[in-house]
Image (cartoon, rainbow, N blue to C red):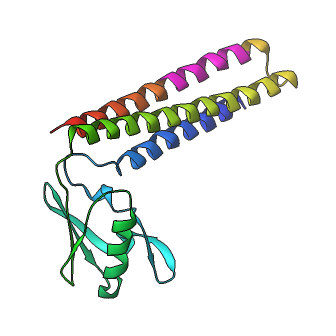
Amino acid sequence: MINEVLHQAEAQMKKAVEALQHNLATIRTGRASPGLVEHLPIEVYEAMMPLNQLANISVPETRSILIQPYDAGTIRAIERGIQQSDLGLTPQNDGRIIRLTLPPLTEERRRELVRLVRHRVEEVKVSIRNHRRDALEDLREFEREKLISEDDLHRTQDRLQELTDRYTKELEQVGTTKEHEVMEV
């Protein structure tokens, strides 16, 4: 019972870290990356679809992304989706492929992106603390129902705090790594 609560809390914390890593992949650094656009929502066939389901995405050079649609009829929709995104990139369309050229980031923009990274890391830290709180509520309920002893509750609280600290430290590491990528010229 106690182990189930701990395993569930750990699984939720792990998912939160993975979600952050996925989320931070969409933040632009000095180099081109397919992760920057692959999950960009594109309205096509009267539905929203991620770009990676509509096209092959490659990085031929450090500052450009090449998008080859599987269906040439979707090229306009992909172009429109990129223009409407918050990436600030202008697609160049030659009728068969779309080329995105990433201009160098200014120092001011880099600092904005670092603030965005820190904000997203902090949001996930709050999420991890919420998972800890939920697990603690479950444990306290078990103790009230006399399913576990008070000593078991305290030991499990300590283990839960260790889990929280471990995943918080992992979050900070992920955030710091992304900040260094963003600030790298």
Judged from this view, the residue extending furthest toward the left is 61
Q: Percent position (x, y) of residue 9?
A: 61, 34
Q: Looking at this view, is 58 or 6 the one in front?
A: 58
Judged from this view, the residue extending furthest toward the top is 151
Relative side of 18 to 147, left or right: left
Does the segment drawn in magenta span residue 23? no
Judged from this view, the residue extending furthest toward the bottom is 73
Q: Looking at this view, is 35 or 107 the one in front?
A: 107
Judged from this view, the residue extending furthest toward the front is 108
Q: Quadrant of the N terminus?
A: top right
Q: Looking at this view, is 51 or 156 the one in front?
A: 51
Relative side of 9 to 70, left or right: right
* Residue 141, image quadrant: top right
In the picture shown, does residue 58 fall above or below 44? above
Does the segment drawn in magenta span residue 160? yes
Q: Percent position (x, y) of residue 88?
A: 30, 58
Q: Percent position (x, y) of residue 85?
A: 39, 62
Residue stretch rendered in magenta on the structure:
152-165
Q: In which quarter of the image is the C terminus?
A: top left
Residue drawn at x 59%, y 29% as measured from the top left:
129
Residue drawn at x 43%, y 25% as measured from the top left:
169
Residue drawn at x 47%, y 27% as measured from the top left:
168
* Residue 149, image quadrant: top right
